[in-house]
Image (tube, rainbow, N blue to C red):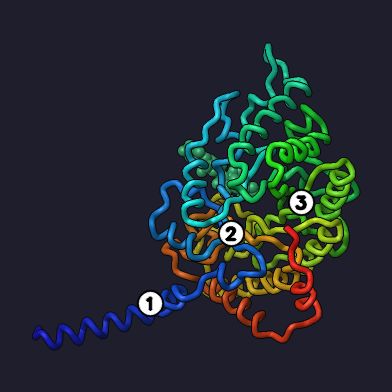
């Protein structure tokens, strides 16, 4: 092949590649998610950052204001056995964030999962007494929250305390080891210690499916309202509610919007803390359990529409929403592996959902200001 033909071939190939990947990538390079939503709410992602490639770290710097450690600040990893604390992964993660001007959100201090059995074991093989369990909890909260004081914006103090499948007529608290060892007041106590340990941190109650039943005032949403009212009455220093947002193609969006306004009516701030929307139409969600087949291309368009509608809701309520965090940065950095629930592919290519969110933000900017948008501007966030 002579030199001119070879050069022509290279130009044609490069142009073809640019059409397949390059245009999208070039466009994404110009648009940053966090810049698109600046002044509305923080955009976040979950990740422990250990072992992340330089491309993944660059993606975080470009698109996200704030990172939540996906696992490394939980009770089991931070205190696997009594008094043996391990902070190597979260310390490195927080250091990287501080150096790169990325904020950090703490997750989580009190949870039924990823918590060492030793918290609940007493001497002589007996269950720990209420006093012993509380003493251990206090030490754990003080040690972890004080270590990151001034470096985290806030904490998911209590995670997932409400059980599934309740009617909504009671708080329906999960009968966890904490509940058994201490009782329902353990939740209030955790908030009080977190406040003492870090007086400036925002303190959140965080749970999944707590929007479900909001319109009809039933189910897990009704239980969450009951629980939050009690926590407030008992003097728990609670700043806000984290609606986790593990959603799917048929998620009830009316419930999502009503839940946001219901929580705001209690005087609480709201965050979407663990957002992902499965592209499989399946909500099992867990660790590759289902959804292993090929995902039809049209599902990615449907997924983009669900994300767009969700962000339209969040923008309408930007006056009470502080943060929207995705639970991972890409379809391979996701607990919902193979359900392709996030905005970027494993190769960090932006998906239709990413473009839909950039578009939703710019349409919102361009739209004539309605009454509620004007109100948002008149009453700036107080936090
Ligand atoms: O740390 C061990 C490692 O030593 C071992 O080699 C490896 C082998 O599989 O497992 C590692 O632990 C895993 C851990 O993630 C860290 O990768 C656990 O098996 C696995 O169960 C754990 O899953 C995490 C899950 O919480 C635990 O319940 C997910 O990554 C994490 O995304 C998920 O996050 C939760 C939120 O905290 C609360 N809301 C729901 C959300 C999704 O489940």
Residue marked by disc 1: 22
Residue 281 percent across, percent down from the top left:
62, 65
Lower position in the chain sequence, tag 2 or tag 1: 1
State if disc 3 and disc 2 touch (CB < 8 Å). no
Q: Is mark 1 within 8 Å of ligand 1?
A: no
- Quadrant in which residue 216 is drawn: bottom right
Spot occupied by residue 230 in the image (x, y as percentages of width and height): 88, 44
Secondary structure, mark 3, is loop
Residue at 72% across / 45% down in the picture? 160
Q: CA distance from mark 2 to mark 3?
A: 18 Å
Classify residue 41 as left or right of residue 103.
right
Q: Quadrant of ligand 1?
A: top right
Q: Quadrant of residue 298?
A: bottom right
Along the line of sight, the residue nearer the viewer: 1 or 58: 58
Ligand 1 lies under 8 Å from the Cβ of mark 2? no
Residue ID for mark 3:
239
Q: Quadrant of the C terminus?
A: bottom right
């Amino acid at each position: 092949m002579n030199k001119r033909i070879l050069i022509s071939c290279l130009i044609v190939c490069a142009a073809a590649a640019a059409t397949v990947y390059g245009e999208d990538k070039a466009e994404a390079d110009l648009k940053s998610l966090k810049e698109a939503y600046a002044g509305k709410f923080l955009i976040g992602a979950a990740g422990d950052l250990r072992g992340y490639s330089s491309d993944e770290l660059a993606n975080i710097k470009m698109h996200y204001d704030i990172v939540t450690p996906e696992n490394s600040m939980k009770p089991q990893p931070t205190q696997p056995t009594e008094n043996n604390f391990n902070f190597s992964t979260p310390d490195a993660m927080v250091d990287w964030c501080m150096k790169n001007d990325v904020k950090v959100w703490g997750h989580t201090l009190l949870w039924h999962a990823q918590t060492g059995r030793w918290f609940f074991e007493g001497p002589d093989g007996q269950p720990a007494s209420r006093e012993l369990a509380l003493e251990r909890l206090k030490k754990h909260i003080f040690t972890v929250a004080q270590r990151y004081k001034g470096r985290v914006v806030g904490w998911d103090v209590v995670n997932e305390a409400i059980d599934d499948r309740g009617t909504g007529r009671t708080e329906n608290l999960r009968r966890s080891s904490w509940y058994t060892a201490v009782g329902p007041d353990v939740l209030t106590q955790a908030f009080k210690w977190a406040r003492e340990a870090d007086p400036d941190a925002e303190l959140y109650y965080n749970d999944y499916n707590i929007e479900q039943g909001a319109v009809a005032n039933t189910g897990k949403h009704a239980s969450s309202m009951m629980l939050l009212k009690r926590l407030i009455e008992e003097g728990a220093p609670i700043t806000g509610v984290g609606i986790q947002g593990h959603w799917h193609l048929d998620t009830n969006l009316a419930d999502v919007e009503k839940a946001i306004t219901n929580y705001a009516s209690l005087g609480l701030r709201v965050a979407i803390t663990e957002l992902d929307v499965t592209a499989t139409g399946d909500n099992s969600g867990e660790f590759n359990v289902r959804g292993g087949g090929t995902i039809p291309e049209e599902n990615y368009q449907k997924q983009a529409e669900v994300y767009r509608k969700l962000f339209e809701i969040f923008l309408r309520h930007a006056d009470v929403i502080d943060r929207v965090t995705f639970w991972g940065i890409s379809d391979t950095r996701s607990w919902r592996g193979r359900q392709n629930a996030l905005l970027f592919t494993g190769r960090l290519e932006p998906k239709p959902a990413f473009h839909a969110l950039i578009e939703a933000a710019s349409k919102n900017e361009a739209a004539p200001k309605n009454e509620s948008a004007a109100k948002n501007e008149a009453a700036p966030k107080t936090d």
